Image (spheres, helix red, strand yellow):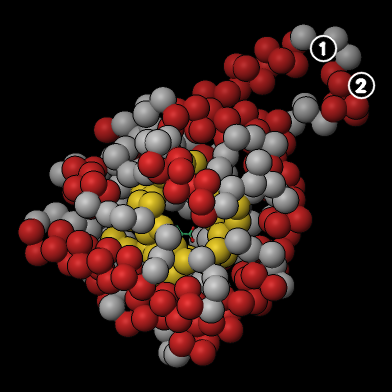
Amino acid sequence: MKHTIKSLHEKRSKFEPITWLTCYEYSFATALNATDLDMILVGDSGGMVALGYTDTLPVTMDEMIFLASAVRRGAPNKFVVGDMPKGSYESSDYDAISNAMRFVKEAGCDAIKLEGSGIMAHRAKAIVDSGIPVIGHIGLTPQSSSAFGGYRVVGRGDEEQGKLQNAILELESAGVFGILLEAIPPLVSKKLTETSTSIIFGIGAGKFTHGQLLILHDLLGLFPNFRPKFAKNYVPDVIPQFEADLALHGDIVEFGRTTRRDGLHEITRLAVEAFVSEVHANDFPNEIYSYKE
Ligand code: KIV
């Protein structure tokens, strides 16, 4: 079943954790489509893991539409969120609405995500008023990280916690249906989640948020350059099951030809299901994958 804002809110009110992964192309999207995952983010992190840029800043709208359209084709049953790249929404409400609209009309996305608060909450409101659902993104915001002291944990100390709380109020007043917290200690996220009215998602924000996001390439151990503390590679967990499944079929070549369940597609599907199960069981993220308070 493809989610709607209503069904996502229902999960929130029933305390059922929401699962969310990034994806950037068709074949992986088909693997995600075959799981119980709730949502997909076509993140501008695709600029790094799929296009090879050293950070997310160079990513263009055209590139995002290219990636998002492929994901939509591969995952027709998933709620897909398009990530507004740097430069696509900051300068005016007009730009923000036009570019958000491209995600919906050209790529078939169900919602968009944008980074920041303050003036960016106004941009979020303009997009919401145009009829497009929006998720805000605060805490570590990679598109403006150099202005805020680089890639670092956010929310330690009263001043930073107050700023996060205000940002949530601004974004919720703007009408966003969800907010992503990135790189925030678990107990800080817990407080922010408890006082929110929207759906709070976390990446590197501990286990107390309503939803959990991970980068697909981290979950699969597919990105060679670095891996943040909060990223869990699920491949070692699922290889024994993959091998056991293969061992049930004597003729592996024939098994692969008829089912295509003999390779990376199946390993991806198993790894995603393992992530979904651990989030449902409240086992991910544990303290190994969380920042210290
Ligand atoms: O682009 C992306 O994948 C993101 C995550 C880092 C949160 O925005």
Instruction: Give, as a three-letter code, the residue at label 1.
Output: His
> In x, y percent, where is residue 205?
30, 47
Q: Which label was assigned to residue 212?
A: none
Q: Does residue 287 appear in this view? A: yes
Under circle 2, the secondary element is helix
The percent position of residue 275, horizontal first and vertical second, equals 50, 33
The quarter in which the N terminus is drawn is top right
Amino acid at the residue labelled 2: Glu
Q: Which is nearer the eye, 195 or 151?
A: 195
Q: Nearer the viewer, residue 178 or 202?
A: 178
Is ligand 1 within 8 Å of the beta carbon of the residue shown at mark 2?
A: no
For label 1, the SS is: loop
| Position above or below: 241 against 102 | above
Is disc 1 in contact with disc 2, using a CB cutoff of under 8 Å? yes
Please tell me in which quadrant of the rendered image residue 244 appears.
Answer: top right
Q: Earlier in the sequence, mark 1 or mark 2?
A: 1
* Residue at mark 1: 249
- Residue at the (9%, 64%) spot, across then down: 159
What residue is shown with label 2?
Answer: 254
